[in-house]
Image (tube, rainbow, N blue to C red):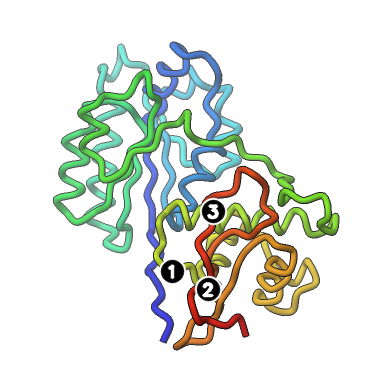
Amino acid sequence: MQIVEQERRLAVFIDFENLALGFKQGGGRFDITRVLARLVEKGKIIVKRAYADWVRYSDYKQKLHEAAIELIEIPKRDITGKNSADIRLVVDAIDLAYAKAHIDTFVIVSGDSDFSPLMSKLKENGKYVIGLGMRGSTSELLRDNCDEFIYYEDLKTVVKDQGAGSGKLPEGKKEVFGLLLDSVTALMRENKPVIYASMVKDTMKRKDPSFDEGNYGYRMFNGLLEDAENQGLIMLYRDGRSGTYVVSGLGEDTGPAAAPRPRRKPGARRR
């Protein structure tokens, strides 16, 4: 019988003013697509909220709207006080933690140590807490109080039309193979002990909700996996009990930057 790991359900809270200060010190602009591309590897994002005085950050609003992020308006600080955005974020997060039991993972995008008590309370209530912030403006207290912390600078820029690393691939398949490799690499990065075909497909759908193997000429998802193995991109074996495909690693044709490749399970046959 195949053991299916339960998909995480995420709520993302963005302290945008704290991020803006970090970018002001380090230069550059905040790219929400880089953040979401990493977080969908963790699970399904249910809630996305960003807090700021949006009159001051109006040039970011369109990109955030396009990413379906709810913008919570916090009026000028001289009217509401210095910590009004922090307080509103904390109240909303705690309210959601109690009201929506199915949300098991909370992501706090900020480097502000003031959120440390929030993270402690969320963990006390059985929630998994992920922090995300910039190296130069993240408090060590906040970082160390998370179950997991991601530095913004470590996130890769999202490239829509990513190839799969080989000029031999059919032109019409490079996009889907790129998405497949990106998803398998994400699952390996999350240290999944067994990467079932269903987990790969779920990750691909989270990264690109429009994905459908039928659009690339495959009747079933297994056909895409078999084609990718024939192209030398991944390695497969069949689970001994369920008979479903398991991805054991990346193949020989994924380029020099590929992650370490575990060998196929001893004694297991592909078909």
Please state the horizontal and vertical placement of residue 156, each as a whole percent of the image: 56, 36
Residue at numbered disc 2: 246
Q: Secondary structure at mark 3?
A: helix
Residue at 70% x, 58% y is 177
Q: What type is the residue that disc 1 sits on?
A: Val
Q: Foreground residue, 124 or 251?
A: 251
Q: Quadrant of the N terminus?
A: bottom left
Disc ID at residue 194: 1
Please state the horizontal and vertical placement of residue 25, each as a whole percent of the image: 44, 11
Residue at 30% x, 36% y is 89
Residue at 38% x, 58% y is 9
Q: Foreground residue, 53 or 108?
A: 108
Q: Establish if 23 lies above or below 117.
A: above
Q: Secondary structure at mark 1?
A: loop
Please state the horizontal and vertical placement of residue 143, each as a whole percent of the image: 27, 33
Disc ID at residue 79: none
Q: What type is the residue that disc 3 sits on?
A: Thr
Dots 2, 3 in contact, CB < 8 A: no
Q: What type is the residue that disc 2 sits on?
A: Val
Cα distance in 3D space between marks 1 and 2: 7 Å
Q: Earlier in the sequence, mark 1 or mark 3?
A: 3
Q: Secondary structure at mark 2?
A: strand
Residue at 50% x, 72% y is 196
Left of 113 or right of it: where is 245? right
Q: Residues within 10 Å of mark 1 (few under 14, many from 20)?
A: some
Q: Earlier in the sequence, mark 1 or mark 2?
A: 1
Please state the horizontal and vertical placement of residue 105, each as a whole percent of the image: 32, 53
Q: Establish if 218 lies above or below 154.
A: below
Cα distance in 3D space between marks 1 and 3: 13 Å
Residue at numbered disc 3: 185
